[in-house]
Structure formats: structure tokens, C-alpha cells
Amino acid sequence: MKDQQDIPVASSHRQRPSRSGGRAGRITARAIDRQQKTGYAGVTGGTYQPLSEQDIHRIHATALDVLEKIGIGDPTPEILEYALPKGCLLSDDGRLRFPRALVEDVLARVPKKFDCYAPDPKHDHQLEGSRIYTGTSGESVSILDYETQQYRPSTLTDIYDAARLTDQLEHIHAFYQPFIATEYSQALYVHDINVAYAALSGTSKSISISTIHAEHVDALVGLFDLYVGCEGGFIKRPFCTIGGCPIISPLRFGKENTEVMVRCAELGIKYGNACAPQSGATSPAALAGTLVQCFAESLACLVVMHLIRSDAKLIFGMWPFISDLRTGGFSGGSGEAALVAAAAVQMGNYYDLVQSIPSGMTDSKTMDAQAGYEKALTTTAVALAGGNHLCAYPGTVGSLMGLSFEGMLIDNDMLGNILRLVRGIEVNDETLSFDVIQDTVFGTGHYLNHQQTLQLMQSEYLYPRLADRRASGEWEDSGSPDIYQAAREKVKQLLASHYPGYIKPDVDARIREKFPIKLDPLDKKPGNGRW
Amino acid sequence: MKDQQDIPVASSHRQRPSRSGGRAGRITARAIDRQQKTGYAGVTGGTYQPLSEQDIHRIHATALDVLEKIGIGDPTPEILEYALPKGCLLSDDGRLRFPRALVEDVLARVPKKFDCYAPDPKHDHQLEGSRIYTGTSGESVSILDYETQQYRPSTLTDIYDAARLTDQLEHIHAFYQPFIATEYSQALYVHDINVAYAALSGTSKSISISTIHAEHVDALVGLFDLYVGCEGGFIKRPFCTIGGCPIISPLRFGKENTEVMVRCAELGIKYGNACAPQSGATSPAALAGTLVQCFAESLACLVVMHLIRSDAKLIFGMWPFISDLRTGGFSGGSGEAALVAAAAVQMGNYYDLVQSIPSGMTDSKTMDAQAGYEKALTTTAVALAGGNHLCAYPGTVGSLMGLSFEGMLIDNDMLGNILRLVRGIEVNDETLSFDVIQDTVFGTGHYLNHQQTLQLMQSEYLYPRLADRRASGEWEDSGSPDIYQAAREKVKQLLASHYPGYIKPDVDARIREKFPIKLDPLDKKPGNGRW
């Protein structure tokens, strides 16, 4: 809970500027330094509100009707054991019904904020209100290879490389499993353990892993305990969230994912549900109807978690998806996708829930202008709406099927810009600048060398890393590269130089003794470069 | 004032769906047909509000301080003649000061809505509130040629071609001069007349022209009268707006542009000012200060126009621009650009002014992912804020220096998506879909073939023209095209087939008799294709 308490939000330049630089100058310098490292982690959204309050109430009321009158099918025996004594009902058709008073009660009682720990405490953050943190998202099954520009199945090494890139990208605040390690897709224990190992090897930011086996959750806890060096150590600072899809839309529990959710609740581990119905396919074509169903499905997860343990931490995951109804296929990057996700954020914020939300999906197969605009329009809408855990899919292309490392770097710039937008404009006597305007009009006639300009040039403005701002002649002289090409060179450089060595040799040895680690100890390579 | 009154906004599917299709089905079919033609012209923004009401009041109060205590330098003799008798003051330093009561009075009295006519009345629209119409914008001096992918100076033919493309792009609602015809940049009378001729030849949508010579305004009126076929005909339905930059920031009148503005006010022609200070260069580095100065500069234009003629129609143009303060250069596509423009929109909407706002600028030199995300993030922010005349710079690249025709087509898709987002979610008994959910859960378990899905598949969803939604394998089999390449083929096809012939031969002859028309009568080419 450190960085975001004193990130250089607007208030950091509220003090009067000192002509000499002096103390204020040093404060500004530190603020700039922090900003360069942390980006705008924790800025507050909520200035965009697509739904009226009445809309929210109607969606809420209908979702509660759905839970009470239609319920959720295929409840597992464990869920019945936990939920029936607390007031849920099993109807003759085998569906679990949720009385509305129970749901309302849970909504009022669940924790409204909680810590999101990271392996390195400097990346800890607090999830609350409409504060925003971004993360990679997953889980793609292929990579748009940066060396061949062709799709191929993703591997464990790709996960490690994605973690190493995330570690260096200041506008990506957490590492959620971006790939499946396809070579281990028939050996899920090896898979899940190695995904966690690769993540911890490559980044010290907060991580998230998906698994469909409840017993793997216990194994992961064991791995994490070895990483932190004491039994029970992980659970004191759980730096890994488990994610999954406990609901099969429309309105059924999925057995394996549900078991994982239940196990996380029992252990007190943060769990992120992604209820992802597709409009017109697995939820109504009417976007309002999709919101109703998606809200009901997520509420079912929230109630179940809460009935298991009243301090259970669910990252409330309404992930309403869009279908292209000409084909029935999933479509990630449209205006409808942006809209329904932003509305979901507003629902979550209305009830002050800690939530996750997807954005940055694109149907383009490559990092072209379509990818750029689809990612930006969805992420801008959702960030302005104020989703906490912004699962921004940096680099992900092809309707979630693949991921491009160049795209991760490009999207890092994009995310910086969008978070800068969300941060907003500070309005006070200083920034209103009457004196500065007067000085300039009756003085040099130009602001470039004004003291205010020098003081604000870093804190008020973000300078992108990759985006090309050169004149067209200079750009042509350098071979007219597009940003996809420019990013490729940077990917090569970053991956060649950044071996952070987060798992120390002695810890590594203990982990390898107990777990089937497949990743080479790559950390022994030289260098620890940073962008 | 036709299309937007019955565009297929949410209310068009408020009627209960008829099982048989029947009348409701026919209504839906017509709505779909209209939507395909008009896009979402006239959707209402305003759901994103970056400033608090207190922020607005403070910016307002400080801007009025600026106008009263600093004033605007270099007033022209005409302005003094109009403004001094009405209460403005000329101070000893030669600056025109605006008493705050006068400014408040003008703000209360100016027209809050007015018609934006088009050569073809079917493209007329009404500017008011936070309804949004998009347009091309300008004026670039070069084109990123679609045949060579290199920059070259733009020509009159490029303007004609841009008009012909605009004519076919449903999410671009007006044609504002996108290029300078550089071959006539030393012959401005020939230039301005021919720009107008090229625009009218290529599109029947509302047009806008820039000129820096007041007498050209009168000449253009003469040209437009010939076009409509009677003297005084244009002024009854002025389908052309004149645009320009009457203010040289900080806070001085520019002589030539000001004379044009004055002449437009005298004639009753709609005028669009673009007050475009660059933060940290020609306005304060603090974004709040840039808003103050930009608001003051635009208010000066508003007051002057109003004092000349109380029904003068100014499209209030706060165009706050961003500098990259490392170089002092203009930067168009950043989070700061999105933010300060969205805040400007909110200022304009607060006072219910008809306004223009820029978006869609990019510093990328080509239509790559950078162009995509910079255009989308700025346009999404500004559209959600609800700017009326959204000068969205479709196709414009290279920090406003050039324009790509492929980019126009790509941005047309992007604009459609963003306008769909702005349109929002309709929440009512029908769309909340309780019955549909119940039917499906206890029925087929799938929504794809549900009557609601079939009825909403067009009206609830936008299907982009160019965006690639195919599976990655299919995309690879077709040669892995990016959208820039795909758009190129479409540009060639559209330009080869669309010669709309809006200027009839007899009218053309009369125009050529009186004006030095340089554009070949290209309309005689065969074909009148539409996308």
C-alpha cells in the first residue's frame, strides 16, 4: 500500500512553485521519478457513467428476479452444503435459488476494499472504489511470434518472457496469466505449477493464475510458501489471485471452476470470477438483458463465496462479451463491447464492489490500426468508468486467440495515455494560471520558458516510449517504420537484457526439489536491463 | 432536420416485438436500412464529465478576469467600431477589454441551437445540446498517397477525391476542407473558389471552407448562389460554414481571419472559430490554465460576433492543443489532448453553446497501431463528452501534416463504433429480457435463434465495413493483410466508381463562366457506385 498513496497525482504540485527550484523543486523531481516508475497506478475513474441511476436499479431488480425465480443450475454438492443452511433454496428442477433479501444482505456486507499484494511489496496496491490498476490478461493459446510475425502455439517460455516484459512496463501493474503453456496442456499439474514459477521468475508484480483443479490451489500455496520462505507465509500476503469461470452461461455452475472458487474461499485466497456470457449467444441480444444475466451470474458467485466465509475476497467479474451475430462468433473490440463493459463497471461501482473488467480485446489478427482503435476505444470507456482491475489484454490480438509482444509494448504506451486521461485536470488557483497568463501576455509573449512550464513539463504530461512524434521527413529518412516494427526492436532488446533473478538460487533449489519445474534456470544469464 | 429525428436510436425498438415479423418487422427493416445509411448521426453525448461543476465555475470566472483585465490585443478597426459602442473598452495599451457583465449577457443571449444545412437537405442536421455530428477536418498540406504510401503535396484533385469518399462514408456527416490545394497556394482566390467547387462536386453533405480573405466570402456566396440557382438562395439555406482562427494565442486578434469572421457575422453566415493555443507554448502548461485562456479567446469571438449581429451563428471552437514540451512541437494524440478537449466540450455544453471540437489527431506518420489508438482515445473521450461538431480528422496523420485516404475508411469504422458507444444502452421491460432469459434457460439453452436476437441483430449492433473479424487461420490464408492494406483496395474501388455528378452540366457551365474553375469536369466519367 505504498506507491499509490503518494503517486504524483494532481495534489503533488499544489504547493506554490519556488522560483529557486529549492525544496519544491526536489519534491517535483521525486514526483517525476516516481511517476516514471509507477505510471498512474491507482488513478480514480468514474467520470463516465453510461447508465442512469434508474437504469441501475432496474437491472439490479431484474437480476434479483433472475436469481430468485430462475436460479443457477448444476450446483455442486459443496455449494449445496454451504448455501442451503444459509437460506438458498434447491428447487425441484435442481436449480439453486437465491432469495432477494439474502442477496441484498450479502451485497451490503461483503468487503468493499482489500489489499492486492505483490511478491515485491513496492507493487502492492489497494483495490477499492473506482481506483484503477491494469494487468495482462489471458489465456491465449498462441503467440504472434515477434521473430516470424506468424502465429504459433504458446509455450512456457512465452509466459516467462511475457512476465519479464510486464516487469519493465510501467503502465501494466499486474501480471495475469496471458498464455496457456500448450506443451503441458495434457499435464495440468505440471502446467499450473510451471505457470506460477515462470510468473514469479519474471516479475515482482502481483500475479494471477487460472486453474481448473481445486487441489492445485493447495499445491500452488505450497509453492508460494517455498518462495516466501516459510510455511503459511503466502496466506499472510497472498500475492497471487486465482481466476476462473465458475459460471457456464446461461446460469449454470461449471463443476471444476466452481470447486476452485470454493477452495479459494475456504483458504481465504483472493478469487477473480469472470462471468463472460456472449450477447445473442449465451445471453440476450439486448445489451440490457446481457447486463442483467451477467450481474445475476456474478452475484451468485459473490453470495456463494460470502456464505463460505464472510471475509472471502471476490474480485467481482462481470465480463459481458459481444457476439458478431452474423456468425455467432466472439467479437472483442466493438463499440458494443466498450459500452456493455463500461456499464458493468458502473454497476460494480454503484455497489462499491472490488471488480475486474476486460478491455483492449481486438478482432484484428495483427497490431495494426484496427487493433489500435479497438483496444483504445474499449479501454478508454472502461477506464473512464472506473473499473478496478482493468484486465486490459495488452498485446492480445485475434479475438483473444493470440498475443503479440510488440503489442504489449505498444499497449503500454496506450495505457499510459488513457490513465493520464483518467487522472483528470487539477483546477486550483495555481493551475488556473491567471498570473502566468498576465506575465506572458505583458512579457515575452511565449510560455515555453516560463517557470510554470519547466515545473509542470513532467508532472502534467506523459511522454510515450514508443509513439513516434517526429516530423514526417525525419520519419521517412529513417525508413518509414510503423510502430509494430519499432516495437519489435525494443522487444528484442528488453528480452535480451532483463533477467531479474527474482527466485534466488537457494529458493530455486528447494522449489525444484519439491515441484516438477520445467523452466530452465534462465535467470543465470547475464544482465538485468531496464527500459 | 430529417434523419436525426427518426434515426434508429433505442426508442425505435421500444414497440413489442411481433412474433410474425409483420408490421414491427417492417419497421425494424426500415430502421436498419436507415441506420446503414446514416450511421448514428445526432446521438447525444455528455455521459463523460471530466470537470466538476465547481471546476467549471472557476475556469469561467478566471476567463472573465482575463477578458476584463488582460483583454485581447490588436483589435481591428472594424471590431472597435462594433464593440466600443456596446460596452467594450480600449485600454491605453491598445487591448480590447470585455466587461464581465457584457460577456455574461452575451452568453445568455446567443442562439443555443441552429440548423446546419447541406447541399442535399437529407444531410441537414440541427446543432444543439450535446448531439454529435462528425466531419473531416483540415487543412493538411500533404497526402500520404495511397498508390505510393509516400507523402506528397496535396492538390485540388485530392480535395475532390476526399469529398467523393466522404460522400460514401456513413459515419462522416460533413465535409470540412481536409487539404490545401498546394498548387494554388500563391493564388488564394483561385484556391478558395476551387476548394468550394471540388467539395460541391464530390459530396452533398454539409461543407466547410477556410479563407483568410473577407472578400472571398462574398465571392463564395456568389458561387453558392449559382449552385442553388438563384441570387440570395444560399443565404436562405447556408450549407457552407466558413472556418478560421481569428485569435493568435495568447490573446491577440489576427487581422485577416478576424476580418473574415466579421464579414460572416455581417452576412449571417455560420462561422466556426478554432482557438487553438498550444499548452506550454502559446498557453499555460497547466491544462486548467490552457482551458482558461482558450475559453477566454473563444468568448471574445462569441462576443464580437454577437455585437455585430445578435443572431450571428458562431460554432464555438475551443481547440486546446498540446505541446510535446521536450521539443515544443505540436502533439495531437495524447491522453492530455483527449482530456483537455473533453473538458472544453464540457465547458461548451455547460453554457449550452453550439460547439466544434477536434479529435482523431495522431502523431504517427502512417495508419498503424499508434494512429489507431491515438485517434480512438481522443475521439472516444470527446464524443462521450458530447461535442456537437466533432472535427474528427478521419485519415489525418503526421500531427495534422498529412492525410491518408485509407485512414479515412479505417476511421469511418472507428467512428461508427464510437458513436454506437455514445448511443448507450436502452433499459426497459423489453430489453431487460427477463422473459427471454427464462425462455432460454428452460428451453434451448441458447439465444442465437431466439426471436429477440433476430430482431435486434441489426439495430443493437454495428457491423464494421473493413475491420477484420475472421479467424486467424483464414486471415493467414488470405495473405495476412493489415487493415491499412485492406483499406487501400477499397479506396481504389470507391474512387474508381463514385462520380456523383452533383453539379449539373448547365450549372457547371454558368459557374465556369464566372469563376476560374480549374478542376476538370470529372463528373462525366461513368458510374455512380456506392459502398
Image (cartoon, coloured by chain):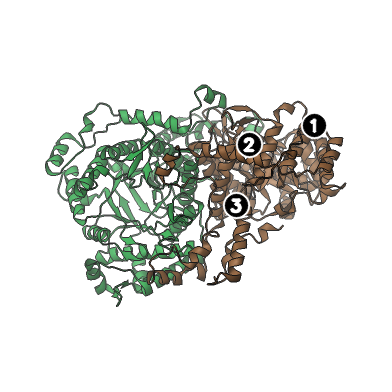
Chain colours: A brown, B green
Judging by the rendered image, the residue that carries numbered circle 2 is A277
Q: Secondary structure at mark 1?
A: helix
Q: Are marks 2 and 1 on the same chain?
A: yes
Mark 2, residues whose alpha carbon is within 10 Å: few (<14), some, or many (≥20)?
many
Mark 1, residues whose alpha carbon is within 10 Å: few (<14), some, or many (≥20)?
many
Q: Residue at x 61, y 66 (%)?
A: A26
Q: Quadrant of residue B129?
A: bottom left
Establish if A225 lies above or below A252: below
Judging by the rendered image, the residue that carries numbered circle 3 is A386
Mark 2 or mark 3: which is in front? 3
Q: Amino acid at mark 3?
A: Gly
On what subunit does the disc labeled 1 rest? Answer: A
Q: Quadrant of residue A515?
A: top right
> Percent x, y for residue B11?
46, 44
Q: Secondary structure at mark 2?
A: loop
> Percent x, y for residue B212?
25, 55
Pointer 2 or 3: first along the chain: 2
Residue A94 left/right relative to B186: right
| Marking on residue A237 | none
Pointer 3 or 1: first along the chain: 1
The front one of A354 and B496 is B496
The C terminus of chain B sits in image quarter: top left
On what subunit does the disc labeled 2 rest? Answer: A
- The alpha-carbon separation of the residues under discs 3 and 1 comes to 36 Å
Mark 2 or mark 1: which is in front? 1
The front one of A412 and B27 is A412
> Percent x, y for residue A430?
51, 70
On what subunit does the disc labeled 3 rest? Answer: A
Judging by the rendered image, the residue that carries numbered circle 1 is A189
